[in-house]
Amino acid sequence: MELGKTVLWGLLGGMGLLLYGMYIMSEGLQKIAGHRLRSILSTLTHNRFTALIVGALVTMLFQSSTATTVILVGLTSASIMSLKQTLGVILGADIGTTVTAQLIALKVTEISLPIVGIGAVIIFFTKRDHYRRVGQVLMGFGLLFLGLKIMADTMQPLKDEPFFRHMLMSASDYPLLAIAAAALFTFLVHSSAASLGVIMIMAMQDLVSLHSAIYLLFGANIGTSFTALLSSLGSSREAQRVAAAHLLFKVTGVLVLLPFVNPYALLMTKITAVPGYQVANAHTFFNIGIAILFLPFINQFARVLQLIVPDRKEPREKQLTSKYLDEKLISTPSIALGLATKEIGNAADQVYIMIQSIIKVFERSDTKLLEKINKKEDYLDLLCKCLTDYLTNVMRQPLSRKEFNRCMSNMHIVADLEHIGDIIEKDITYLASSKISRQSQFSAEGWEEIKDMHRRLFDLMRIANVALASNDIELANEVIKECPNLAGMERHLRAQHFKRLKEGTALSISTSSLHLDLINSFLRISEHIHNICYEIINKGNNSDFNQSHHTDDKIMSHNNLAKA
């Protein structure tokens, strides 16, 4: 009884250290290279072989194919990656997990304490953020293997307990039960590395036979796909196909190899007589075999997945939601910020359509189009709220200084887009409604001036949208240089209007307030477009300066109005 309690607490403590080590190591890696991860996954995965290599390298770093697959589900859900791109990465991720098993076989656990010590020294005796993150990664890596060492030491006495030894050794007599148990354990701890470590320790302690270890490895490989499968529920069909692909890769590999476990185990014993290396090699060859089996047929496999998980038609109500934001990826800030950027592009597109449409309402006195603009503004409000909440949650995660500034910059852009929507809804659509209800008409000269100013405003928004989508600093600079010209134009048009009032032009007199308020609303929209382009240029550089810039813009706007 006393031995059982000792083993239980030792296993729990060791598992806790292992999982915590993985957590802080992953967190440190995200701070070091996280901002590059999204671009790497989206740009270097068009070729199936480079996708395989990228998947293996990313998983080696994060020590978890589960984490890699969950990230892929989110990127696919946000349309950043295609299904074909992710299949090669998934196969590579499965190969990447084998490094953990090989390191355990090499008894890296024996040097875990020095690694923790080195990491701690770096963290506490350096002031530079970059070095502190390196120390965090080393400390996490050391804690991971220290947890495995504690579990190994805890299990050592079980060798002399006939009941435990018999129970574990007989796992090969019940292969399906062993596979199911290992799959469940892997799913519960959300880490294939953790379950592999336990299997490796049991093999190295001679607590399980090679046959039993192979069945447990099969279960661990299947269980690692369950977390991604659950994370895909409620996501797009493409994301569900990614999760299903991971599960099908594993299950197919197990079904193919299951009848040949005896010759497979014999092959492992011929390669090496050391139990630890036998199990590590069994895991490595299994995943390399899956990659060799599926990699040449990725295109065909993608088509099969489209048949298994067909597209669905969503009701209109469900379309009025954010397209790209994924709450599950907030814990991976670099990816979450990429998704937020795409959603901001979606919000900017809504603003672009609204600005394009407003002139048509005045031209045609079109009340139906006016209603569409108001609905579009409601959708924009929804997107801005979702984005603000999402970015706020991202800011609660551990962020590098650059990621924090980028997050603040995105918040400013969202605020400016929302302000443009408010100007259109509260001011311009009100003016349009007033014109329609009164059946007012602008003077010919006044209408041409309004159309000319709108045309220039629309061009500014179009260029700003392209700059935002492509992160083009030159285009953003072009908008910033043009904005003062629009302010000058507003002053000139105001003067021209006053000239017509002085001359007694009847139509100008009847629509005076409409005319002046409309061109003023155009000017205010241009100032927010200016702010957006300023953020594109300075994104991630200095959030404090960005904040002060916005304040100055608002003061400048009020001054312009006062002068007018």
Image: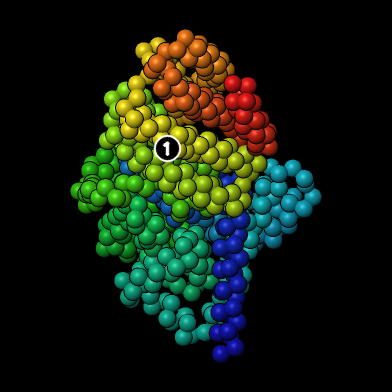
- Looking at the picture, the colour scheme in use is rainbow
Q: Residues within 10 Å of mark 1 (few under 14, many from 20)?
A: many
211 left or right of 365?
A: right
Residue 117: image quadrant is bottom right
Q: Is residue 505 above or below residue 279?
A: above
Q: Position of residue 354 (x, y in %)?
A: 38, 32
Q: Position of residue 409 (x, y in %)?
A: 58, 37
Looking at the figure, which quarter contains the N terminus?
Answer: bottom right
Residue that appears at 54% across and 52% down? 393
Number of numbered discs on residues = 1
470 left or right of 144?
A: left
Residue that appears at 31% across and 27% down? 439
Q: Is residue 490 above or below residue 255?
A: above
Q: Nearer the viewer, residue 182 or 520?
A: 520
**Which type of secondary structure does the marked residue at label 1 adopt?**
helix
**The residue positioned farthest toward the bottom in the image shown:** 1
Residue 431: image quadrant is top left
Q: Amino acid at mark 1?
A: Glu
Q: Position of residue 343 (x, y in %)?
A: 43, 40
42 left or right of 115?
A: left
**The residue positioned farthest toward the right in the image shown:** 125
Q: Position of residue 76 (x, y in %)?
A: 37, 44
Residue that appears at 45% across and 68% down? 188
Residue 8 seen by the camera: yes
Residue 344 seen by the camera: no
Q: Is residue 424 above or below residue 16?
A: above
Q: Nearer the viewer, residue 54 or 214?
A: 54
Residue that appears at 60% across and 82% down? 6
Looking at the figure, which quarter contains the C terminus?
Answer: top right
The residue that mark 1 highlights is 425
